[in-house]
Image (spheres, rainbow, N blue to C red):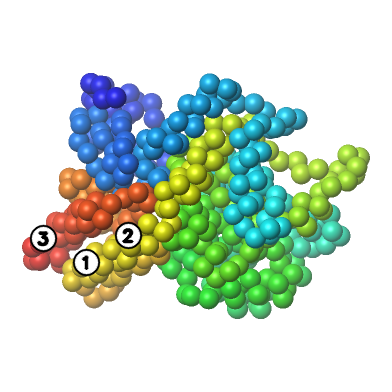
Amino acid sequence: MSRNWNTESLRELDRAHSWHPFTQMRDWCAGEPLVLVEGDGAIVRDSDGREYLDGNSSIWTNIHGHRHPAITRAIREQLDRVAHVSFLGTTNAPASELASRLAGLFPPGALPRVFFSDDGSTAIEAAMKMAARFWELGGCPQRSRFVAFDHAYHGDTAGAASLGGIDAFHAGHRFPVDRISDPNGLDRLATDEIAAVVIEPLIQGAAGMRVWPAGMLRRLREKCDATGALLILDEVLTGFGRTGRMFACEHEDVIPDFLCLAKGLTGGYLPLAATLTTEKIFAAFLGEFSGQKTFYYGHSFTGNPLGCAAALACLDVFRDENVLENLQPKIAEMGRLLDGLRDISGVFEIRQCGFMAGIEIRRPDGTPLPWQERTGGRICEAARAHGLLTRPVLDTLVLMPPLCTTAGQLERAVGALRRAILETVPASRSQPPP
């Protein structure tokens, strides 16, 4: 329910005490932070009552829209039971049911074991620790290296950050990681030392929404099978309908050894992550307590009932509202609308994968703009004035709205981007907005 907010008071509190991620706080504190207080479907509202399309799904998390009645109801009903209980030594109904539901999204026996954690980074951490320990327990301690891809991003905890290929995020982390650009890169490595290969399937998000070539994931699975390396798929971004199917790996009929989920798992409502794996991996950790095979890793909020209840409701919405079927024409409409931006001289390339896209801005001759000019950031700030909220990856504008976004809202979002580009990029200003 709406209420009167003291916007300037909230801003002052934030400037005085908050430290925001990936944010230069000197500039932030000198500006007028946007205070978001309400949401409804694909719309969010600020403390002054202005409405915006949530063009990046609240940092890529929201799936079915804000304040979805089914998810809200599930959380409220669980609150009337218990908000949190330990997953160390006990279990709870939502977590047990969710583990079964997640395993059931794959062919029988494919990924039957589910390890819960808190976010995408910890889902990756769990997979890495499981993979390394699996080889140790199997008598192959030399298989301790991980392979990741150029420009990768898999999170900010120590293990996940060591996989990253973007210096601004990962400089200083030194774990045993080899970096390749395509599956053939495995041929140049000592494959008997590789514990696992990690990749975001179909598209690299933080690299600027860069789409992998068709068939690449299938080739990588075959390479891993040939070398014995385990395959870890980071579907933190791509999972839960973003690519047009429930999971990106379905597009190429690939089953990994580990599947990492977070962000959209709860519909974007609460922090929750899951690492799915095979019975073979799970069985390697079984034995007498004295054998020290136990997987010593976990979090206080592992299997949190509120998060698991939200995730169960999120899966129900996919089923009850035929979300994936209804999404297909929206994907086509997004592509059609984005094609209309190609006549702008500052638009270098448009990359789309399912219901998410990146619009890369460069000079008319194709050379990158100086990153210090923050062109992508300034375009997104200009789009705010036209009712669209999103964030760039450097000079690549991200459009990734909730799956419930309507065709009309898509048209408004792309129109806002067009106007913002024309207002911000000097080479484009001669072209008037439509």
Location of residue 154 by image quarter: bottom right
SS class of the residue under badge 1?
loop
Sequence-first tag of 2 and 1: 2
Q: Tell me which residue sits at (56%, 50%) in the image.
A: 261
What label does residue 433 carry, if any? 3
What label does residue 220 carry, if any? none
Sequence-first tag of 3 and 1: 1
Nearer the observer, disc 2 or disc 1?
Answer: 2
Sequence-first tag of 2 and 3: 2
Q: Vertically, is 254 above or below 129? A: below
Q: Position of residue 391 (x, y in %)?
A: 33, 50
SS class of the residue under badge 2?
helix
Amino acid type at circle 3 is Pro
Determine which residue is flagged by label 1. 341
Q: Where is residue 16 in the image (x, y as percent from the top left)?
A: 34, 25
- Which quarter of the rendering shows the N terminus? top left
The crowd level at tag 3 (other Cα within 10 Å; few <14, some 14-19, many 20+) is some
Determine which residue is flagged by label 2. 330
